[in-house]
Amino acid sequence: MLEVTILAVLQGVAEFLPISSSGHLVIGQHLLGIDAPGMRLDLFLHVGTLASIFVFYWATLWRIVRRFEWLYALKVAVSALPAVLVYFCFKDFIDGMFENARMVGALLMFTGAVLIGTRYLPRGSKDVSLLRALLMGLGQALALLPGVSRSGMTLASARGGRVDAEKAAEFSFLMSAPLILGGAVLELAKSAEGPAEGEIGWGLTIYGAVLAAVVGYFSLKLLVKALKGKWFWLFGPYCLAAGLMTLLLV
């Protein structure tokens, strides 16, 4: 149960805060001796964080559905294209990166440098256009590499495009929903082939998903507050330190 708790909290915190959940999972496995989660647990942890997005932005989602805002939906679809194309073209390379903790440490330092750089970019007040959605999508594609933060890259891209901070945060997390859902479906299809050896029980799986959802919800609140309060860049020094520590210890 302790291992599930650690993984669920890690997923809920790092999925949304710009510190790379995938990178922290790889580092945790190497430094703390935590085994990789079973396919079922990994699937439900992601479903839990997806649920926190739906709860946090339920009003926006309901507005999109009720008013049939096809243009907003189109922007979300456009933003997902780069990550989908990059993943299917470079799947083996990306998967191999999860075995290289030192490279993850270096990429985490790259994330830190980008986050610190956002401090010097002017704040904007623009909406998310199709072009800016594509730009954020390119940042999301780069974050397929463990150690590169998805929220960090998408929000840094939005800052570069002079997008309003609150609108950028909303779009950044809504644009992640199709990818999280798609990844969950792929893992579900794999799990249909048969249970993996050492898979944990359903009770702990549901517990992990609920915990990841709760922690993820409050992580979202913290990040939105950070963006409004202009201290988003402070996650950068943490990523630099965590990356450097990984390079020294692994």
Image (cartoon, rainbow, N blue to C red):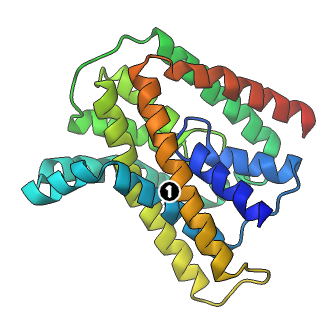
Residue pointed to by mark 1: 49
Q: Is residue 31 above or below residue 162?
A: below
Looking at the image, which is closer to me, 141 or 177? 177
Q: Is residue 169 above or below residue 54?
A: above
Q: Residue at x 86, y 50 (%)?
A: 30
The location of residue 42, given as percent across then percent down, is 63, 66
Looking at the image, which is closer to me, 67 or 202? 202
Q: Quadrant of the C terminus?
A: top right
Q: Residue at x 34, y 49 (%)?
A: 174
The location of residue 60, given as percent across then percent down, is 23, 48
The location of residue 25, given as percent across then percent down, is 72, 51
Q: Quadrant of the N terminus?
A: bottom right
Considering every residue shown, the one lying at the far right of the view is 249
Q: Is residue 3 above or below residue 82?
A: below
Residue 242 visible to an observer of this rendering: yes
The location of residue 248, given as percent across then percent down, is 90, 30
At label 1, counting other C-alpha atoms closer than 10 Å, the crowd grade (few under 14, some 14-19, many 20 or more) is many
Apparent side of residue 33 relative to residue 231 in the rendered image (left or right): right
- What's the amino acid at mark 1? Thr
**Res. 147 image quadrant:** top right
Apparent side of residue 109 relative to residue 234 in the rendered image (left or right): right
Q: Residue at x 69, y 45 (%)?
A: 23
